[in-house]
Amino acid sequence: METGQKILLVFHAKQSMMVSMEKSWYRKMFSRLQKTGQELTPPNADCGDADVQFSMGLKFANGKGATRDYAQAAEWYHKAADQCHSLAQFNLGMMYAHGQGVTRDAAQSVMWFGRAAQQGDAGAQFHLGESCHRASLQGARKDAPESRIEAYKWYRLAAAQGYEHSETAYSTLTINMTREDVAAGNQRVAKFKVEKPRHPQA
């Protein structure tokens, strides 16, 4: 393909290099991608509206072919998440957990799940429960009971909202918990209050 292009340039000397480059397959693709990105981005996307920014993240994450761009999705989710948008925080947590558009980072994942969970997002509560449960199995033995109690709390909170598999998760978890640990977990569930989003100051 490249050889053919060179022959055309040799035998059509009147055709300038610039014109030839404009018609090349990679320039066409690049311009099509730019156009697609512009069509996806509404003029008010950077206005600071967290819902608009979250929608942009969804468009890039769920796009097909050239319109799917996890790195762009993560950027938009980040903008909305920084404004306490719980669904953006949850999605960002998932992206860090799986390394989609960002470097895989368990600590960042847990942090974003934690922020969304505090705002009452059931999915984030369930995934935070899973993270705590894993910590109880992989961490130091002395820290395991505390991690299990936290896992129990988050599973119970997610189950109260009907989140799938949460009830099974906390029921299974209690097998390795003492009565005192379960009681402590129930106390934490009872004391839990949804945090109201604190929007950053302008």
Image (tube, rainbow, N blue to C red):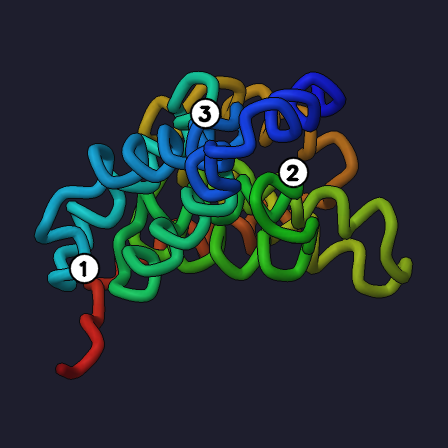
Determine whether label 1 and label 3 are within 8 Å by CB: no
Q: Amino acid at mark 2?
A: His
Q: Which mark is residue 66?
A: 3
Residue at 66%, 46% in the rendered image: 131
Nearer the observer: mark 1 or 3; the answer is 3
Q: Quadrant of residue 196?
A: bottom left
Q: Is residue 38 left or right of residue 129?
A: left
Q: Residues within 10 Å of mark 2 (few under 14, many from 20)?
A: some
Q: Position of residue 86 (x, y in %)?
A: 31, 49
Q: Is residue 39 above or below residue 135?
A: above
Q: Is residue 30 left or right of residue 197?
A: right
SS class of the residue under badge 2? helix
Residue at 89%, 62% in the rendered image: 140
Q: Is residue 51 above or below residue 29?
A: below
Q: Nearer the viewer, residue 91 or 198?
A: 91
Q: Quadrant of residue 37?
A: top left
**Residue under numbered circle 1:** 46
